[in-house]
Image (spheres, grey):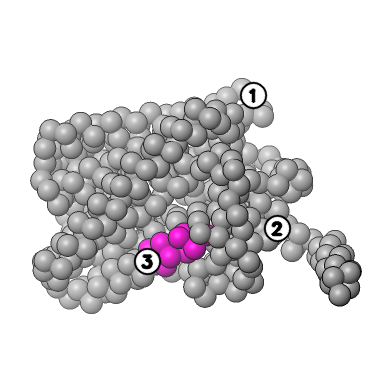
Amino acid sequence: MGKRAAHSSLAAVGRVQLRLQERPALRGQRVGLALTGANVDAAPCLPGCSAPHNHPMSYRPDALKYLTAHWFAIVMSLCGLALAWARAAPVLGDAATAIALVAAGAAALMFTLLALLSLWRWQRYADAVAADLKHPVRHAFFAAIPVSLILLTTCGVTLLGASGWLAALWWIGSVGQFGITLWVLARWLDTDPKRQPGWNALTPALIVPVVGNVLAPLAGVSLDADGWAAAQFGLGVLLWPVLLALLLARIVTQGPWPTPQLPATFITIAPPAVIGSSALQLGAPDALAWMCWGVALFFLLWSLHVGRRMLAQPFSVAFWSLGFPLAAFAALSLRLAERHPAAQTVAMIALALASLAIALLVIATFKGLRQGTLLQPEPVALMAVADNGPSASRP
């Protein structure tokens, strides 16, 4: 009986390999999954995902090696959710404030945990960290660390009020974000062709280090750093349309980013949403904020077009790219609804959508950690195939 089962398994594997050879598109999809670090064969799905369920896996002894900076997107999402619920307090009362405090507290604990684990990873797997810094896509997510500090400070100022220690944290995050922006863009001037970014590096992930500067006024104004906050905001506003044009050029000339990076499409919602909130913080008229809201709404509806293909793949940490943009859109909607009550219903729908999405992300993450399908390596063979694909071509 055992021999018959083994023979059937080998035959099934042979049929799958034959189908992969006959279907290049499917093979390319598996290549893309490998590039995100997701386990191709046994990863959990978000509710509604059509990927097959597999048996739980055990953790790798070197799982820490694969804890990339992308995990700080969890902190960004929880902070964004806290800020959105804090904006709902005038309508929903103390319950909204309590939810905001819980989300902010969870974000602070998550940041502390990830920071300690990242330091441990740097000590044990310095080569892996160096590889992430050189990676055409993963290097951009190092900006999620200072961005998380800025957002944590913003939560503190919003919920607890301004203080000296919050100002110190804000300055660390703000200057760190400015420095990472300079480092990322300096890579574009590198004379070594191997280090220069190609079309494969042009994904919405670059929005985090390049446009993340627009977050500065959210807390900077309350911390008496409005001058520097406005200057950093100006940098982000300048670079956003430049990066957006490059992303559209990549789509036209090379096609969209690989399937595993589709969740990053939702990052395009964040810049206009945050610019609108920061502009109001700097004293801009409501009309400018409504313009930003309209652009953010467009990118939300535009991003939904990849929803079916996105949910058809196994869950990975890349799905956390949805969390903060949806929360930022909800926060701007609620802020505008304070001045324009007619927008209250739309704002509440946006808040519910962001809360539901982040709740599902938390559930899927716990499931993935329990099954051991997260924190997995990228198969070397699949990486080699991907490097020879169209996404690696240069203009």
Q: Range of the magenta residues?
A: 358-368
Residue that appears at 66% across and 46% down:
378
Pointer 1 local density, CA inside 10 Å: few below 14, some 14–19, many at least 20: few
Pointer 2 local density, CA inside 10 Å: few below 14, some 14–19, many at least 20: many
Residue that appears at 88% across and 73% down:
4
Q: Are marks 3 and 1 in contact (CB under 8 Å)?
A: no
Which quadrant of the figure has residue 301? bottom left
Name the amino acid, label 3: Ala
The percent coordinates of residue 17 (x first, y second) are: 84, 62
Which circle, 3 or 1, is nearer the viewer? Answer: 3
Q: Which circle marks residue 359 in the picture?
A: 3
Picture layout, residue 188 above or below residue 392 = above
Q: Secondary structure at mark 1?
A: loop
Q: Which circle marks residue 192 in the picture?
A: 1
Residue that appears at 49% across and 50% down:
204
Pointer 3 local density, CA inside 10 Å: few below 14, some 14–19, many at least 20: some
The percent coordinates of residue 52 (x first, y second) are: 64, 72
Name the amino acid, label 2: Arg
Lower position in the chain sequence, tag 2 or tag 3? 2
Q: Main secondary structure of the magenta part?
A: helix
The answer to which of 131 and 210 lies nearer the viewer is 131
Picture layout, residue 375 above or below residue 302 = above
Say whether residue 32 is left or right of residue 343. right
The percent coordinates of residue 54 (x first, y second) are: 64, 68
Say whether residue 304 is left or right of residue 115. right
Give the residue pinned by disc 2: 30
Lower position in the chain sequence, tag 3 or tag 1? 1
In the displayed image of the protein, which residue is found farthest to the top? 191
Which circle, 1 or 2, is nearer the viewer? Answer: 2
Lower position in the chain sequence, tag 1 or tag 2? 2
How far apart in space, not on screen, are marks 2 and 3 (Cα)?
27 Å
